[in-house]
Amino acid sequence: MKEIIDAALATEATSSDFSAIPLPESYRGAVVLKEQTGMFEGMATRDKEPVKSLHVREVPTPEPGPGEALIAVMASSINYNTVWSSIFEPMPTFGFLERYARSGDPWAARHDQPYHVLGSDLAGVVLRTGPGVRGWKPGDRVVAHCLSIELTHPDGHDDAMLDPEQRIWGFETNYGGLAELSLVKTNQLMPMPAHLTWEEAASPGLVNSTAYRQLVSRNGAAMKQGDVVLVWGAAGGLGSYATQLALNGGAIPVCVVSGSRKAELVRSLGAELVIDRAEEGYRFWRDERTPDPREWKRFGSRIRELTGGEDPNIVFEHPGRETFGASVYVARRGGTVVTCASTSGFQHEYDNRYLWMGLKRIIGSHFANYREAWAANRLVARGMVHPTLSSVYPLDEVGAAAQSVHRNEHSGKVGVLCLSPGEGLGVRDAEKRARHLPAINRFRTG
């Protein structure tokens, strides 16, 4: 591993240098264990602790198959799918690995293991490529998006997210990015933005691409200039990128946050219309089973107060159960609720009268296809969208990192150092970095 790290940090290292480094037989990865999937049974979701279920273990190094690459992971980040995996909700991810192994692909059998290496983001260096790979070689500095796709079915050739064999790498496949090495398909790879550090470059991938598809793409809400966009959790992982995309696209974001620190963060992004849920005390449920439409109406009135009487054209919805009824209610007549994730619960309730009589639409959105992910990464590389990295943990403390996200103690993204020996490494364009440094560091807490 020392040879790999030294080569990754050396600006003069060539493709031949990386090809000559012998691969280790094993590497350290953040795993959940099949034998522990029942450890949280009977507990409420909020009481389950990723710090108890996420372990850093040595696992065997996989050989890259056709169209695949083995990546030296310098840094990764925590996404909510890592939290779900670590608390075994809505189901243990080992079922995904077992189904993948039965898919008929002889290389897929490797993914069915008694351990699951998690993680759906990375920034690192290509170490090896499998047969048939073109366009990528050892030594290339890359980030990875998380769509693992087969494209053997016609449905995927218009939009890869519709392919019946699409999976989320590191969630529905093994050998994810929260590790020293990772196995990816080479059509997941994108160039690493040259002005960012390893940990900064690793943080936007999943959430930035997801927000891009939800808001900008024709497969999502197809946002246009002047649209009022309600962004839930605007200082969080998804919302912080949605806010930037709305502002870049000439839309008018109404940013919902919880707490004064988060309100300051989204204002520093350029958002002018901010609702602090903690300060204004919105409670959309009277109890566990009873929504409160009076709060929907109070919330809608507050939005109109901020916008000069306009309702949202688009609601960027990802909290799920807690907020979905309010989202449907406040969307303007003919407006769109675009939804993913459901971090507060998958079973939604809303009053369908407001949907059908208001001619509103609900669009389901799930990650992004390669074209959308590439476009989202291009905005980062050009300095138009910036990382929202707030804190960084070493790989050995990945359980604590996931727990901070589970408890919503974070803003923006939480990074994890894998092979990188420290923060601040990996920058190749110092001049561009200097121009954007205040924006890059906006979410940093220390």
Image: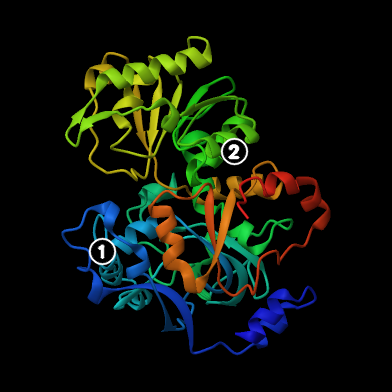
Q: Quadrant of residue 197?
A: bottom right
Q: Quadrant of residue 18?
A: bottom right
Using the image as rendered, state which of residue 151 and residue 37 is in the foreground: 37
Using the image as rendered, state which of residue 442 and residue 155 is in the foreground: 442
> Residues at badges 1 and 2 in contact (C-beta under 8 Å)?
no
Assess disc 1: are there few (<14), some (14-19) or many (≥20) residues with their C-alpha within 10 Å of its C-alpha: some
Mark 1 residue element:
loop
Disc 1 versus disc 2: distance between alpha carbons? Answer: 35 Å
> Residue drawn at (16%, 34%), measured in percent from left and top?
289
Q: Amino acid at mark 1?
A: Pro
| Way the structure is coloured | rainbow
Give above or below for 27 relative to 150.
below
Answer with left or right where residue 220 lies relative to residue 320.
right
| Residue 167 seen | no
Mark 2 residue element:
helix
Residue at image mark 1: 92
| Residue 343 seen | yes
Q: Quadrant of the C terminus?
A: bottom right
> Which mark's residue is nearer the viewer, 1 or 2?
2
Give above or below for 320 relative to 91.
above
Residue most extreme to the top: 309
Badge 1 or badge 2: first in the primary sequence:
1
Q: Amino acid at mark 2?
A: Leu
Measured from the top left, where is residue 291 in percent x and y?
22, 28
Using the image as rendered, state which of residue 22 and residue 41 is in the foreground: 41
Q: Quadrant of the N terminus?
A: bottom right
> Residue drawn at (64%, 64%), measured in percent from left and top?
198
Measured from the top left, where is residue 301 in percent x and y?
40, 14
> Residue drawn at (38%, 76%), measured in percent from left and top?
107
**Which label sits on residue 265?**
2
Measured from the top left, where is residue 416 in percent x and y?
54, 65
> Residue drawn at (43%, 50%), measured in percent from left and top?
160
